[in-house]
Amino acid sequence: MDCDDRTPSSSDAIENKTECEAFKSPVCLIVLGMAGSGKTTFVSKLNSYLRQYKRAPYLINLDPACKNMPYTPNIDIRDSVKYKQVMKNYGLGPNGAIVTALNLYTTKFHQLMDLLGKVNVENSHDIAVIDTPGQIEVFTWSASGQILTESLASTFPTVVVYVMDLERSTSPITFMSNMLYACSVLYKTKLPFIVVLNKSDIVDPTYAIEWMHDFEAFCDAVENESSYMSNLTRTMALTLDEFYNELKCVPVSSLTGHNFDEFFKMVDAAADEFQKEYRVEWNKLRKEKLQTEISQLNKKLDDLAVSSGEGEPVPLFTSLSAGREISDIYLAPNADEMSGDSEGEEEPGFNVND
């Protein structure tokens, strides 16, 4: 039954209203994948495909190091965090700077959630796409990545889209590495999961689908490998047999748009799955987290009440050196300032020791 047709009793009115509002929320697609798998190209084609059907998605770029963006995002981390400035100030390499930039952006993530909430109220977009950094481990195994994922999943229907490069996975050992990473992300995020077999216009995806559903065919392919990893790969393939049974995968081409209609059918099914199975668990986690925070606050108040003497000021936040906030140093007012900073040049008027 459609939400607008429901006539709930007074005891169920609030709960049903909440369910209806959640159903109307934009479905958030977190796009992950190995470096070079074609995530940004996939998001770009996804954007153009949806616009053909007047379903423009809400695009969010979380890759601070991306230089050439083939689409125009609604929210861009590069407008807020000066990636090169982070590298200079901390003396970090590319990966370390990306992690730090994400950490800094997480402190402002409530503003992004507010904007998504506005999208929900206005019902202007039914899909939000989050493009993540090229280095998948930077997002999936960092504290900031976990915070961003949990924040989205606890508020909106959220689906993880894992983009796999068919061209680079023709070797059974490389294929198994991709599948193991996909498996680890699935069990870490605990969200509906879709594997996109990208670049099907270059390589026929039949081999990958066959390896997922036929253990003997994969073992035959491993036999042709002379690497010392062969035995380990064969053992892991048997372990992942159950994982494949529940895995949703679809071959697509981010260049031609082939099979995107099938992908969106899976997205719709995954969104329904989230509402029916995953939302209950996430609501439970939210309540437990809230109870923990309340308990910790009550404990601090009790400790403060029983403390002797006139009392000392309780530091609520750790102060930064020189009395500056993080946002004063690392958050840029606009993208132009960031783009004007070339490699190896210092920002005029900026002094770390100020």
Image (cartoon, rainbow, N blue to C red):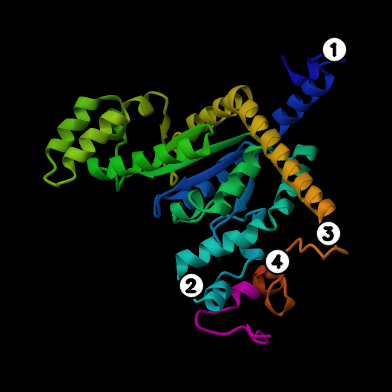
Tell me, yes or no, whether the two marked residues, 1 and 4, touch with CB atoms within 8 Å: no
Name the residue: 56% across, 36% down: 159
Residue 316 vs residue 201, the one in the foreground: 316
Asked if the stretch drawn in magenta spans residue 339, the answer is yes
Identified by mark 2, the residue type is Leu
Q: Mark 2 points at which residue?
A: 92
Q: Quadrant of the N terminus?
A: top right
The range drawn in magenta is 337-354
SS at mark 4? loop
Q: What is the secondary structure assignment of the residue under circle 3?
A: loop
Residue for badge 4: 318
Q: Which of marks 1 and 2 is nearer the N terminus?
A: 1
Q: Is residue 182 visible?
A: yes
Q: In which quarter of the image is the C terminus?
A: bottom right
Give the percent coordinates (x, y) of residue 252. Answer: 42, 38
N-terminal label among 1 and 4: 1
